[in-house]
Image (cartoon, rainbow, N blue to C red):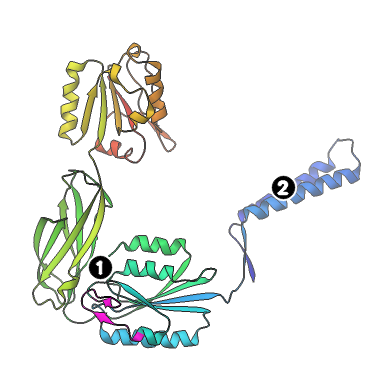
Amino acid sequence: MSLIFEHYWPLLLLGLIPVLALIQRRSAVDLSSRHLQLSLLIRCGLIVLLALALMQPTLLRSSARVAVVYLLDVSQSVSPSAVQEGLEWIRKTNSSGNASSSAFLAFGANSLAFDTPEALAKVPVSSKPQPKAIDQSKTALASALDHAARSFPPDHIKHLVLLSDGNANAGNLSGALEHLRLDNVHVYTRMLSSRSAKDTWIESILAPASVTAEEQFPAEVHVYSQSGGPAEVQLKIGDKVIEKKNAKLAQGLNRIAFATNVKDDSSTVVLEASVTAAGDPMPMNNAFRKSATVFGKPHILYIEGYTPSSHYLKDALTVEGFQVEVISAEKMPATADKLDAFDCIILSDVDRKNLTEPQMQAIPRTCATLAAASSSPGVKIPTVRTGTRARRLKRFSRSHLRQTRNGSPLPWSLS
């Protein structure tokens, strides 16, 4: 058992105690000395308790309630000899350890749980999906980690031991790691050697998690080759082939860059990368998929006081990829929920007398941060604030609009 503190700067507060004692000695209050001493004692006690609380003490004590889950990679990318070495290491480690609970999982494209190392050693495997067998065609590390996280008993210290070559090619690994962190699972790794068979596979796809419709974004495909040589790398969105590239792969990790966009306003799309290399002994691990969220075009509400001149700005914004809706001041929504449908609000040459009081009040209710000051007589809009700095928006650009994509719309005033 031990006591640790998160911070030590609160000890400086103890320096107030001598100051309080000095003040008491010079006090002109007509109280008995006993009363003054009791008052000093209470105040000093409060300072000590406040300092102790700010130091955030934590009491650590040992526990015998330790649960261990062994997660073994048996996919085709791991050599058979490495799998046997991993099984032997699990047997020795489990027998010499003092864990109160142990579980054993094998994984490839799917995962299965076993009660003993002996049962784990007899895990059935297959090159394609079959019931009660491990599909070796993929390495779905993310789903295996989620399975392992669910295998721990409650009220135990959780230790996860991962034995793998690290060549995951399916699933959202970052999400699985966050799940383990939130569950306070301590992860330990042991490296297994990859199968030496001149294999080539897709390691990952580096692309944004969210994109805007019709806006170009980069996608980088990571291809790992054990022997190098010519190959064809293909990128698809759904069933549509975006681009094919012929590349001469070097031994190890290769980065192939693509640039693409999403034409429609689908809520999500799936990027699929695949590689074709001559003499590849295991083509079943040559594809990798990653999903991305697609936002529609930025939606702008343009309120123009002089309607015949509205087409100038509308045409310019439309060319830049914005969706623009032009209305007069009289048709401006008077409730915040209707204004929330827009990413940006533009007011141009709008006279105060053309706006009702509910319309005026709807804008500050809608916008978490307001922008610009109107040049129209009587219309006052506060300056936008980003963090602690105020700035006046003078230029309309995509970068400004992106700052509001996940929040409320920005009002703009044009003179």
Q: Position of residue 288 (x, y in %)?
A: 21, 64
Q: How far apart in space, not on screen, are marks 1 and 2 (Cα)?
A: 60 Å
Q: Position of residue 209 (x, y in %)?
A: 28, 52
Q: Callout 1: 10 Å neighbours few (<14), some, many (20+)?
A: many
Q: Position of residue 404 (x, y in %)?
A: 33, 37
Image quadrant in which you'd find residue 149: bottom left
Residue pictured at 25% horizontal, 83% vertical: 79
In the image, the segment drawn in magenta is: 121-136
Query: Dot 1 corresponds to which residue?
Result: 169
The rendered magenta stretch, by its main secondary structure, is classed as loop
- 48 or 158: nearer the viewer: 158
Query: Dot 2 corresponds to which residue?
Result: 16
Residue 197 lies, with reference to residue 155, above or below; the image says below
Residue 193 lies, with reference to residue 411, above or below; the image says below
Q: Position of residue 69 (x, y in %)?
A: 43, 76
Element at label 2: helix
